[in-house]
Image (cartoon, rainbow, N blue to C red):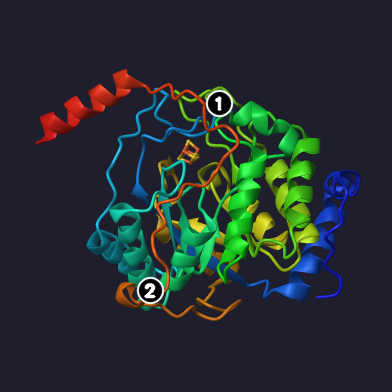
């Protein structure tokens, strides 16, 4: 559409974000109604297909191997397990399954082949498939596209300036590189961030500048409120106020009108009234299921009850873009190249939490 802008400045976005709330809501809701059905919200299910043990040091993440959290690591799920969960998600109103693996980057080999099979399986269930697997190369993005992937998630998390306060094991440019690799295919881009990590309003605006300047803009932008998990460096962060969340959602809607804005982590702390205001301000997707990777999330029945109360309808799959065709593994045009994405801090020393690892092993053995 002609009125989509890719040249937002931080100052302009701050002006939008800081205007009186009623004006902000009116502006955001007007944009929302122009580009989307205001009574339709997509329900997505997030599956952690491989949990914990990640070598990265994202300060908010309980899955980083170096932090002392209660997260129990799990090996890669089987295709059958994933299919069973996807069917359950579909029957409770989800039109999208997002599979997350706690990896720094994708490595060609049997595990990635298994993920490709999961993508094929879910696409054949007529659900949108999204993956979040860390950094990927162009070839890996093409293989995912060929399997029938609908979206790839890779969050920018925050502004480029604040990024170093959150993560040291890779740079902002590494994130943009993966997004660029996804853009070389027909797979849509999902990229957003987290608020409540100690960043300023300028940083929030900075992140939105980075996302809105991508051309095309991401088809999907998740806005998360930090869930401060004990054992992570961000355990003492104060919860985000609902007003900040509403302002962030509304501003995202205004600067990226066509995007699907996802109300993501942190919903357990929000009242129904707060969530309703986020929907009014332009959020048109939620994650369903009692867990968001490893952090708590409202129960599906509770969400369906909220939908009934607000008169919202779950969005059908492939409304925004056609369903991709799945190519079977034996007909694949792409070979595994055994390459690794190049990132800017490859020499970073991994400081693993060996104590937590052996404790988890002991617990696993005791369960047998
Ligand atoms: S890359 Fe993902 S799984 Fe790994 S520490 Fe960061 S957020 Fe967690």
Relative to the observer, which residue lies in front, 70 or 297?
70
What kind of element bears circle 1? loop
Relative to the observer, which residue lies in front, 221 or 114?
114
Q: Where is mark 2, residue-wise?
A: 332
Which of the two discs, 1 and 2, sits closer to the camera? 2
> How far across and how far down the image is residue 234, in percent?
55, 26
Residue 207 in the image: above or below residue 163: below
Write the residue at 85% across / 63% down: 5
Residue 74 located left or right of residue 253:
left
Residue 77 located left or right of residue 255:
left
Q: Where is mark 1, residue-wise?
A: 234
Residue 260 located left or right of residue 83:
right
Badge 1 density bin: few <14, some 14–19, many ≥20, Cα 10 Å? many
Q: Which of marks 1 and 2 is nearer the N terminus?
A: 1
> How far across and how far down the image is residue 78, in percent?
24, 57
Q: Are marks 1 and 2 in contact (CB under 8 Å)?
A: no
Q: Is mark 2 within 8 Å of ligand 1?
A: no
Residue 165 located left or right of residue 125:
right
What kind of element bears circle 2? loop
Write the residue at 55% across / 31% down: 169
């Amino acid at each position: 559409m002609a009125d989509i802008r890719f040249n937002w400045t931080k100052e302009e976005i701050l002006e939008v974000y800081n205007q009186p709330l009623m004006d902000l809501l009116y502006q955001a809701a007007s944009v929302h109604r122009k580009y989307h059905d205001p009574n339709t919200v997509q329900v997505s299910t997030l599956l952690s297909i491989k949990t914990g043990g990640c070598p990265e040091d994202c300060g908010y993440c309980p899955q980083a191997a170096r932090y002392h959290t209660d997260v129990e690591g799990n090996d890669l799920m089987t295709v059958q397990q994933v299919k069973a969960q996807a069917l359950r998600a579909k029957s409770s109103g989800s039109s999208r399954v997002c599979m997350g693996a706690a990896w720094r980057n994708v490595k060609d080999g049997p595990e990635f082949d298994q993920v490709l099979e999961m993508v094929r399986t879910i696409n054949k269930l007529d659900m949108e498939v999204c993956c979040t697997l860390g950094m990927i190369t162009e070839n890996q993005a093409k293989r995912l596209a060929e399997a029938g992937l609908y979206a790839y998630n890779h969050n920018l998390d925050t502004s480029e300036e604040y990024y170093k306060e959150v993560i040291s094991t890779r740079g902002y440019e590494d994130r943009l590189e993966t997004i660029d690799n996804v853009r070389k295919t027909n797979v849509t881009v999902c990229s957003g961030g987290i608020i409540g990590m100690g960043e300023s309003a300028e940083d929030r605006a900075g992140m939105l500048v980075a996302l809105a300047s991508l051309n095309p803009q991401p088809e999907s932008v998740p806005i998360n409120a930090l869930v401060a998990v004990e054992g992570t460096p961000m355990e003492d962060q104060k919860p985000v106020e609902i007003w900040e969340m509403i302002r962030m959602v509304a501003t995202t809607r205004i600067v990226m009108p066509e995007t699907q804005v996802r109300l993501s982590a942190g919903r357990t702390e929000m009242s129904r009234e707060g969530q309703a205001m986020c929907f009014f301000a332009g959020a048109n997707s939620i994650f369903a299921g009692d867990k968001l990777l490893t952090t708590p999330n409202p129960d599906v029945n509770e969400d369906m009850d909220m939908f009934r109360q607000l008169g919202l309808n779950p969005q059908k799959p492939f409304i925004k873009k056609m369903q991709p065709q799945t190519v079977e593994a034996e007909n694949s045009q792409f070979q595994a190249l055994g390459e690794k994405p190049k990132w800017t801090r490859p020499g970073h020393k991994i400081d693993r939490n060996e104590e937590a690892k052996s404790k988890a092993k002991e617990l696993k053995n005791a369960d047998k």
